Image (cartoon, rainbow, N blue to C red):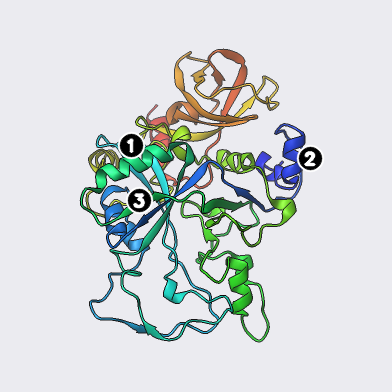
Amino acid sequence: MLPLARRLARRGPGALSRRPLSTGPPADPGVLASRLASRAVVRFRGPEAARFLNSLLTNDVLLSHGAPASSQPQRYAPTPNAPARAPPPRYAALLTPQGRFLYDLFLYRPAPRSQMLDRTGSAPQTGERPGGEDGEGGGEVLADVDAAEVDELLACFKRYRLRSKVEIDNVSEEFLCWQRFGSDVAHAGPSTQEPEAQSIGWGQGSDHAAESSAQGNGHGWQWLKDPRLDILGYRGIFPADTIPPLVEADKEADERHYLLWRIENGVAEGSTEIPKGEAIPLEYNLAGLNAISFDKGCYIGQELIARTHHRGVIRKRLIPLKFVDENDKEIKQAVAPGSDVVDEASGKKVGTVSTALGSRGMGLLRLDSALKQNATLAISDNQDVRVKAIKPDWWPAEWTEVLGQQSAVA
């Protein structure tokens, strides 16, 4: 039987409003798009915007925004009718000085305005690259952040700004965050562009004007591959007064569909699911989600991250959970976040449920107990609820190799 999120994908948003999340008859997975009300948009703008972020965040922001600009003006010729290509987004986190998680950010560098098509679909004339639009140090960066924490996040970044030439503003009234997800959009190809957008308008060649319309509009707004995992689909920031391309009316879904999709893949997002000021990023799998660079220079909280990483053993991780009864039937709405998970055989606490939706959830659990053969886990204050821990397919093999070594010694 297909995972719950994939079965929901065929029902559309109306089904979600008419009935609670539940299992249904098997169906082929579909493609859904969700407006992420849980996310807000912050703009960092100024000649030192990218460098400012790079000095604070866990990932290398400069690599995502291209090589340093030459000291000499560059000449270039945009391809006629070719849509602007924005650099791929970056996923990163801001930590406390002690290396605990504070906020996660999806960072987008809009395509340079000099490369964007005009409203007629004609490319701009050949000319000099306007100063500050490209290169590692300048321009504009849009950040998709946790909406519940946006005010505190703004205050935090402004405290770190000091004399950096960067303006920081909440532009959530101008832009919205969207996600396209489902197995039909997940792929492992090298392109960062939405494949449906690339396939529109074929004839004697590629109809770039149609491709541009499918990707967003003539001003550079595009669906881009989620920087964390291919299976998560595509993400984008779009103007608030428009519906993104490729979003069909019957495929626009409540955000809980996307939450369920993430839960089943063991991917937390935001400061509610990744406890602010408490979570150790490596335990919440941020290294495997491409949020941490171990090669860049210093950033806030780097010491703990580097020490934990090079030690090489993470004994607890965030892992997907399924809640069932003694007959292995899924139980709906029976578990609350914060519930303790215990090993029935020993009575010892194994971990804690961090997120729950219907019969699915995620929890920070000890791997040696959660993934051992014949493990019997339950909710501590409700022994009738059994817990099944599910190792995601995307996990690197080395994350669980220590379990096999321990079993061999035993």
Can residue 402 be seen at all in this image of the molecule? Answer: yes
Is 220 on the left-hand or right-hand side of 60?
A: right
Residue 144 drawn at (x, y percent): 46, 49
Foreground disc of the pair 1, 3: 3
Distance CA(mark 2)–CA(mark 3) = 48 Å
Visible in this render: residue 401?
no
- Is residue 147 positioned above or below 120 on the image? above
> Which is more foreground, mark 2 or mark 3?
3
180 above or below 101?
below
Q: Residue placed at 42% from the left, 76% from the top?
A: 114
> Where does label 1 land, which residue?
313
Q: Nearer the viewer, residue 69 or 165?
A: 165
Q: Which residue is mark 2?
A: 25
- State the residue position of label 3: 168
Mark 1 or 2, closer to the camera: 2
The crowding category of the residue bearing disc 3, from other C-alpha atoms within 10 Å (few below 14, some 14 to 19, many at least 20), is some
In the image, residue 150 lies at what x, y percent? 42, 41
